[in-house]
Structure formats: C-alpha cells, structure tokens
Amino acid sequence: MTFFSKSLRLAAAVALISAAPLAASAETLKDALRSAYGHSGLLQQNRALLRAADEDVAQAVARLRPVITWAARYNYSTGASSRRYFDAEVGLSWEIYDFGRRELNIAAVKERVLATRARLVGIEQDVLLRAANAYFDYRQAVDARALRRSNVQLIRKELQAARDRFDVGEITRTDVSLAEARLASARAAEAGADGQVQRAVAEFVAAVGRKPQSPKSAKSLPRIPKSTKSAVNTARRQHPALVEVGHAINEAELVLRQTKLSKRPIIRVIAGVSTDTLAANGNGATLSGRLEASGTIYQGGQLASLTRQAAARRDAARAQLHTTRHGIDQGVQIAYANLGVARATRKAANQQIKAADVAFRGVREEATLGARTTLDVLNAEQELLDARTNRVSAVVDEQKAAYAILAAMGQMTATSLRLGVKTYDPTEYYNLVKTAPTQKSKQGKALDRIINKVANGN
C-alpha cells in the first residue's frame, strides 16, 4: 500500500471521527424553533404592546358610559364673620349623543388592534426565520470546520511524505517548502473555521436562547409551492405586512369620518347632588340636573386642518399598501431565485466533487511514480476541498432559501410550521377588556390573574 493511500484513508477516518458527535445528536430544527418561540423577548415585548392596544378599545367603550365624580371640602374663613363649614357633592356627566363619533372611534381602535395583531405575526416570522438561519449557519460552520481539520491532517501526512522523499533524494527542498507553506495555510484556515463556529454559536444563543446541542442536518426541505406565481398569490392573501396595512387603511378611513363630524354638537346629561352644613335646612341635599348641547363654532382653522391631516394619512396608508405589495412580491421572487441558484450550485458541486476526487486519486498515484510533483498533489487536494466546501454552502443556502420563501408567503409561524408549542392567543386578553370591565368585576379579576401570570413569566 502506498503512503498516499494510507494518508487518504487516515484523512477519511479523521473526517468520520469529526462528524460522529453530530450524527449522534437528537436536536432538530423544530427543537431550535420551539426554543426560540418560547425565549424571544421581542415576542414578549410585542405581545405587551398588543395588550396595550386592546386597552384602547376598553377606553373607547368607556366613553359611552356616564362619568361620576365626587368632591368634598372643608371651608374655613376669618374676618368680621368667622365661619367653618363642610360641603360635598357628587356629579354625573353623560354624553348621550355625538352623531356617531364615539362609535367611529371604537371601530377605528378595533382596526388598530387587528393591525397590531398582524404586526405581532410579522415579528413571530422574523424571530423564527432568524432562529432557522442561525441553525443552518451553525451546521455549515461545523461542517466547514470538519473539512478544514481533515485537510490539515491530510496535508500534514503529505508533508511527512515529502520529507521522506527528500531524504532519499527523490525531490528537492522546494517541494518540502511548498508542503510546509500549504500546511501553514491550512492551519490558518482551520483557525478561521474555529472562529466562524464561535460566531455561529453566539448568533444561535441570541436567536434561540441557548447554546446549540449538535443540530442534525435537515433531511428534507419544507413544502413550498412549485411556482413563483402560486407563492405570490398566497403571500398577497395572508402576509402579515399586507394584513397590517389593510387594517391601517380602514383605521385611517374611520378617523377621517370621525374628524369630519367634529363640528357637530354633543348632547350631554349633567346631574348632581350636593350638601353643606350651612344649608338653610341643616344638612339637607340639593339635587340638580340639566340637558346640555354644545359645539364648536370657530377654532381658528384647527378643525379644518385636522380633517385635511386625516385625509393625508389615509392617502399615505393607501400608498403604503401599494409599496408593501410590491415589496412582498419582490421578496418571494428573490427567495425563489436564491433557491434556484442554490440547487444549481449544489448539483454542480456534486459533479465537481466526483471529478476532483478522481483527479486527486490520479495525481496522487502519478506522484508515487514520479510523474507528478508535490505541488500537483496539493493543488488537486485543494480543488477537492473547495468542491466539498461549495457543496456544504450550497446545501445550507438551499435550506435557508426554502424557509425564506415560507416567510415571504407569511407561513413562517409556529402554527404553519406545526411546532407543537402552546401558541399565544391574542383574543384571550382582548375578550376580557373589550367591554371595559371595572377592577372589581368578574372580568376584572380574571384580568388580574392574566397580568400576574404574564408578570411571572408563565
């Protein structure tokens, strides 16, 4: 058996040993995505913002109800007639009719809540896509490092072979120096691969919430539409960015209608009861009540400006729909283009590996016969390494592009991916606050339990 054959077998054994811990791992992409879904502070932040938007509905509903206030005073005065007395009053003010402004405000706020829900779905997509990319990038970094380590071992053996041949006078010192230089370069590349693994670990921790546990290589790609047109149609129906803009347009329309009613009067019922110690009948109570209509005649052009401003914001929302739709279409098309490039690159890399492997074996055998130099062997080995590295990158690029397509269609969510986790229900909190319950009510107590549960991180 020639020395080069032994070297090749040793290198293959090193590669298998390096890959063995990964093959025994049990962590899958879904495991990482589940961890990211439960860990993300960004999701928790935007869930809190959604609950804050839900409270806008409660506050808008509360405006339909009477406002009851109270005041109590202790009065003291000195002078010609010094006196002390106490008085108290309870007042009620109720806007009973405003030509539909309050109802429009409630409808507008509900649209804002729906837009915020869609934004939360978009955040969820970003979180899960980042976690998936971190998963694939870590796999790529580990596989690339394994190739670099195998390369160092192989070149070290080739350097020893070159030294042995130099000792017997078969080659010159130049061949040995070339092998030494290539080994130094391979070690530098190995150090760079180690650094890339460390960077990939840092990104994995940031995206997933923990260190990687030797992730498996993905066995298959997610199911995606075969045609770009089908994916674009799906994205236009359900992408959260488009859903959000649609609700933003509806809100702007309602706000404009509400603003146009600002010149209409408001009809109120005002009532009260008061008592004081100086009343003629002792501590008796005085009742009062009135029906009042009020409105604005002139406000220096402010109302007209508010109407124009609301119209401008509606127009801006409509224009945003146009740009968002084009951006989503472009995102789908780019993702499919990247997928096609990755697939073509992977197929080409497979062919390149086959050809480079045959070439390397041939050059190695020819070198044993003196027909090839050490540099020829090193160059052939480098071409084989490059081909294998290209395939590792292409496989990862193909996986990342497939999940980018899911995100571009609006399907990079825990529900669509069937992660099997308990998903956040955006309607639970809303259903409890939409009627503006008081703190002591049954719904108010249920809200306290939910708030405490969220505060404790459960």
Image (spheres, rainbow, N blue to C red):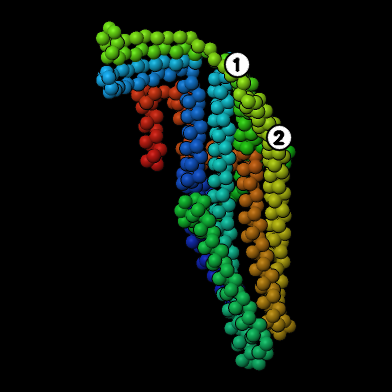
User: Quick one: quadrant of the C terminus?
Assistant: top left
Which labelled disc corresponds to residue 319? 2
Task: Kindly identify the residue that appears in the image at 71 percent across and 35 percent down.
Answer: 319
Badge 1 amino acid: Arg
In this rendering, is residue 429 above or below 265?
below
Task: Kindly identify the residue that appears in the image at 69 percent across and 54 percent down.
Answer: 342
Q: Earlier in the sequence, mark 2 or mark 1?
A: 1
Q: Secondary structure at mark 2?
A: helix
Query: Crowdedness of circle 1 by 10 Å Cα count: few (<14), some, many (20+)?
Result: some
Corner quadrant of residue 200: bottom right
Q: Residue 100: x percent and y percent?
A: 57, 16
The number of callouts visible is 2
Query: Crowdedness of circle 2 by 10 Å Cα count: few (<14), some, many (20+)?
Result: few
Badge 2 amino acid: Ala
Q: Residue 204: x percent and y percent?
A: 51, 55
Task: Kindly identify the residue that appears in the image at 36 percent across and 20 percent down.
Answer: 70
Which labelled disc corresponds to residue 264? 1
